[in-house]
Image: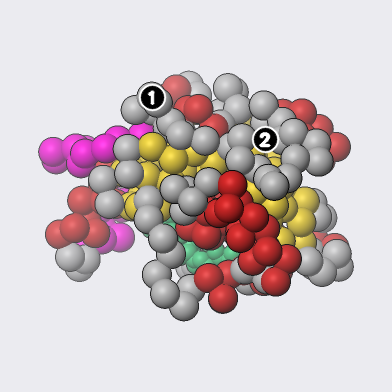
């Protein structure tokens, strides 16, 4: 699904999730000292992407009526949102974004952005299983102008971010099987149903994807009631849809 609006993330997130995105870096955004300390020794481009993405996160906290606070990183790099808030951050060339919601309304959020284009050589075989490869071939026959491989990769990164915020553990690309719909949605299941069994994490995820202005964006949001998953991210995938 192609994004016509410049605000790509808003179009793929449920309405009650606050989102902020920027196509260009903010000149001298005001950050907390603790945040600046995280990138003190980083190269300038990393400091810029970090600062603008944190700036987006602060706007999202404003939108939720939260007091701004330093958004630090845990030991695996995940952002530490204030108590009562779940969210996710992403950045790629020319794009920085944050999304968050109250933890009373959503259990976890994962967003991801990638520069639109094919996946680099050799990556797909690490990311997709034979079923997914077959699905990607069908989708490519349906519309060869779309970089389905990169969209699938991005879906898995968004899922990982949501997963990690619930489970706090690693999840490999092969641990999740993604099914993409050409209408801009995706569904995914853990390949081993016992994964995460003891940590009360849903076995399935759903979300939406969009491509526009040179960016692939994907988003997943996990409701507290996993049964509500399909109905919360509208429009829902068309049941049984498969490209010919
Ligand atoms: C962590 C990871 C998903 C980040 O994705 P990316 O495309 O490299 O980078 P993005 O710009 O989209 O996202 C970076 C942001 O993700 C967030 N992040 C990093 N680690 C995270 C984690 N474990 N959980 C949640 N969010 C995380 C951070 O906010 C980071 O930005 P910051 O360092 O400026 O704070 C990726 O590097 C990775 O390790 N992937 C392998 C695991 C995976 O995707 N498995 C697939 C399972 S189906």
Taking the magenta stretch, the answer to whether it contains residue 38 is yes
Task: Point out the frontmost of discs 1 and 2.
Answer: 1
Considering the numbered disc 1 on the image, is that residue within a helix, a strand or a loop? loop
Residue 206 appears in the picture as rendered: yes
Q: Is residue 220 visible to the viewer in this orientation of the structure?
A: no
Question: Ligand 1 closer than 8 Å to the CB at disc 1?
Answer: no
Residue 238: percent from the left, percent from the top? 74, 33
- Find disc 2 in the rendering and name its residue: 106
Name the spot of residue 117 as percent of width and height, x first.
Answer: 37, 55
The answer to whether residue 217 is left or right of residue 172 is left
Nearest the viewer among 37 and 110 is 110
197 in magenta? no
Category of crowding for the residue at label 1, using alpha-carbon neighbours closer than 10 angstroms: few (below 14), some (14–19), many (at least 20): few
Q: Residue at x 20, y 51 (%)?
A: 48
- In x, y percent, where is residue 122? 46, 78
**Where in the figure is residue 223, as x and y percent of width and height?**
73, 37
Q: Is residue 208 left or right of residue 33?
A: right
Q: Nearer the viewer, residue 243 or 21?
A: 243
- Residue 5's label in the rendered image is 1
Q: Main secondary structure of the magenta part?
A: loop
Q: Which mark is residue 70?
A: none
Q: Could you tell which of marks 1 and 2 lies nearer the N-terminus?
A: 1
Circle count: 2
By what rule are the colours in the image chosen? Answer: secondary structure
The answer to whether 34 is drawn above or below residue 194 in the figure is above
Q: For the magenta stretch, what is the residue range? A: 21-40
Element type at mark 2: loop
Give whichever of 219, 186 is nearer the camera. Answer: 186
Residue at 53% across, 46% down: 143
């Amino acid at each position: 699904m192609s994004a016509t609006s410049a605000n790509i993330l808003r179009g793929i997130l449920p309405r009650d999730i606050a989102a902020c995105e920027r196509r260009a870096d903010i000149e001298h955004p005001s950050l907390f000292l603790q945040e600046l300390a995280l990138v003190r020794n980083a190269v300038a481009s990393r400091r810029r992407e970090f600062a603008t993405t944190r700036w987006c996160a602060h706007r999202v906290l404003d939108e939720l009526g939260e007091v701004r606070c330093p958004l630090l990183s845990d030991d695996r790099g995940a952002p530490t949102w204030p108590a009562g808030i779940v969210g996710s951050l992403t950045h790629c060339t020319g794009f920085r974004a944050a999304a968050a919601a109250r933890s009373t309304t959503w259990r976890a959020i994962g967003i991801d952005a990638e520069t639109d284009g094919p996946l680099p050589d050799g990556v797909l075989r690490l990311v997709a299983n034979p079923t997914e490869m077959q699905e990607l071939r069908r989708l490519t026959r349906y519309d060869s102008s779309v970089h389905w491989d990169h969209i699938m990769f991005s879906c898995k990164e968004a899922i990982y971010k949501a997963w990690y915020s619930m489970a706090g553990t690693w999840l490999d690309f092969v641990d999740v099987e993604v099914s993409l719909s050409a209408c801009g949605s995706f569904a995914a299941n853990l390949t081993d149903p016992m994964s995460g069994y003891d940590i009360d994490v849903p076995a399935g995820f759903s979300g939406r994807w969009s491509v526009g202005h040179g960016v692939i964006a994907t988003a997943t949001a996990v409701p507290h009631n996993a049964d509500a998953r399909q109905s919360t991210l509208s429009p829902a995938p068309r049941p049984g849809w498969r490209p010919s």
